[in-house]
Amino acid sequence: DGGITQSPKYLFRKEGQNVTLSCEQNLNHDAMYWYRQDPGQGLRLIYYSQIVNDFQKGDIAEGYSVSREKKESFPLTVTSAQKNPTAFYLCARSMLVGGELFFGEGSRLTVL
Amino acid sequence: KQEVTQIPAALSVPEGENLVLNCSFTDSAIYNLQWFRQDPGKGLTSLLLIQSSQREQTSGRLNASLDKSSGRSTLYIAASQPGDSATYLCAVLTTDSWGKLQFGAGTQVVVTP
C-alpha cells in the first residue's frame, strides 16, 4: 500500500450530507495532503498538514474540512457546502513538506 | 501562479520505441519537480524526483531532465513495453508556494504490442 491507506474506496452520498474520507499512514511522515482529481484535469490541492494540529488551505479548500489530531491520520470531511463534490480524492504523504510525495489508492465519491 | 502544461494530452507508440514526454512550467523558481504514473482508477506512483539543483535523474529505463531556464522537463522511457501504458503526470513545487505542488493534466500513453 506504499505506507498510506485510504478508505473507503467507493462511497455514495445524498445531497446535503457530510461525508468523511479516511487517510492513514504508517511511516511516521510529518506531511500529509489531500488532492482532488476530476476527469481530464490535473490534481488540485485541497489541504495539507506539516505537523500535528496544523494544516493549511490549498487552492480549493471551500466546502472541505480536515483535522490532524494524530501524526498518522489526516481525515477529510466533504461538507454539504461543497457545490460539486463528485470526484476522485487522493491522499498523499511526504517525510517533510518539499519532499517526495507518495499517494494512496484514492477514494471515489459520487453524490446522488 | 505556477502553470504546468503537458503536451500532447495523449500519444500512442509501438512497443520498443522510446517515449518522450514533455512538461513545461511558467515560473522557473522551482524547488523540485516530480514525475508520476497513474493507472486507470488508481492512485499515483512516484517515478522520479528532480531537485532544482539537478539537471537529470535516472531510474532503470527512465530518465528525467530539468531545464529551469527554459521551464521544461522531459521524461524519457527507453524501449517502451505494453506495461508502460498509463497516464504520466508531472508536478512542480515552487519556492513561493510552499507545500502546494502544481500538477499538469497528464499525458495518456498507449504502447501497442
Image (tube, rainbow, N blue to C red):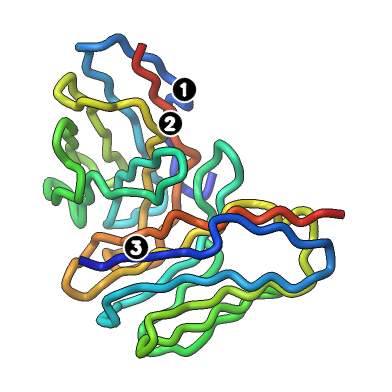
Residue type at tag 3 = Met
Identify the residue under disc 3.
Answer: A95
State the CA–CA distance, disc 3 to disc 2. Answer: 22 Å
Quadrant in which the N terminus of chain A is drawn: top right
Of mark 1 and mark 2, the one earlier in the sequence is 1
Residue sitting at 28 percent across and 56 percent down?
Answer: A31
Of mark 3 and mark 2, the one earlier in the sequence is 3
Q: Classify A62 as above or below A9.
A: below
Residue closest to the eye, B18 or A88: B18
Q: Residue A9: x, y in percent?
A: 48, 27
Residue sitting at 60 percent across and 80 percent down?
Answer: B58
Q: Nearer the viewer, mark 1 or mark 3?
A: 1
Q: Residue A25: x, y in percent?
A: 39, 45
Q: Residue A96: x, y in percent?
A: 29, 64
Q: Are marks 3 and 2 in contact (CB under 8 Å)?
A: no
Q: Are marks 1 and 2 in contact (CB under 8 Å)?
A: yes
Tag 2 secondary structure: strand
Viewed as shown, does residue B40 lie left or right of B84? left
